[in-house]
Amino acid sequence: MYEGLKDSKISSQYFQQLLSNHGVKSLASERWKYPEVHLERLLQLGDETFGRQYAIFISENGLDPAAIDQLGEIDADIDYITHRLRHVHDMMHVVLGFARTD
């Protein structure tokens, strides 16, 4: 999904707007990466925690958060932002209570 939009005019405007924010630009420049997800640890958390609900969502849907890091090189700030969006995507399903999308 993201690859198809990456080179569109609207996405270019979106990325420019994001990167005009000093905090986002700094984050992109540093290339901060999410830590490794340990589902077994998250599943031990309380039922009302985001971590446990995220782990349940990932497990029930047969997803692998580590696979996101294998999708391609991060050569530019736009690549980094796209990479971050992929990480946050499944988290937003949990936060918003949405079912998995294909």
Image: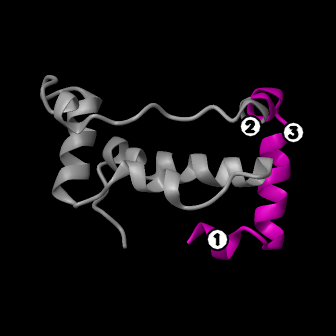
Location of residue 6 (image quadrant)? bottom right
For label 3, the SS is loop
> In front: mark 3 or mark 2?
2
Residue type, label 2: Ala
Q: CA distance from mark 3 to mark 2?
A: 11 Å
Residue at image mark 1: 3
Q: CA distance from mark 3 to mark 1?
A: 22 Å
Label of residue 28 in the image: 2
For label 2, the SS is helix
Residue type, label 3: Ser
Label of residue 20 in the image: 3
Q: Is residue 10 magenta?
A: yes
> In front: mark 3 or mark 1?
1
Q: CA distance from mark 1 to mark 2?
A: 18 Å
- Residue found farthest to the bottom: 4
Q: Is residue 83 magenta?
A: no
Query: In the image, is residue 79 above or below residue 30?
Result: below
Residue type, label 1: Glu
Which range is magenta? Answer: 1-26
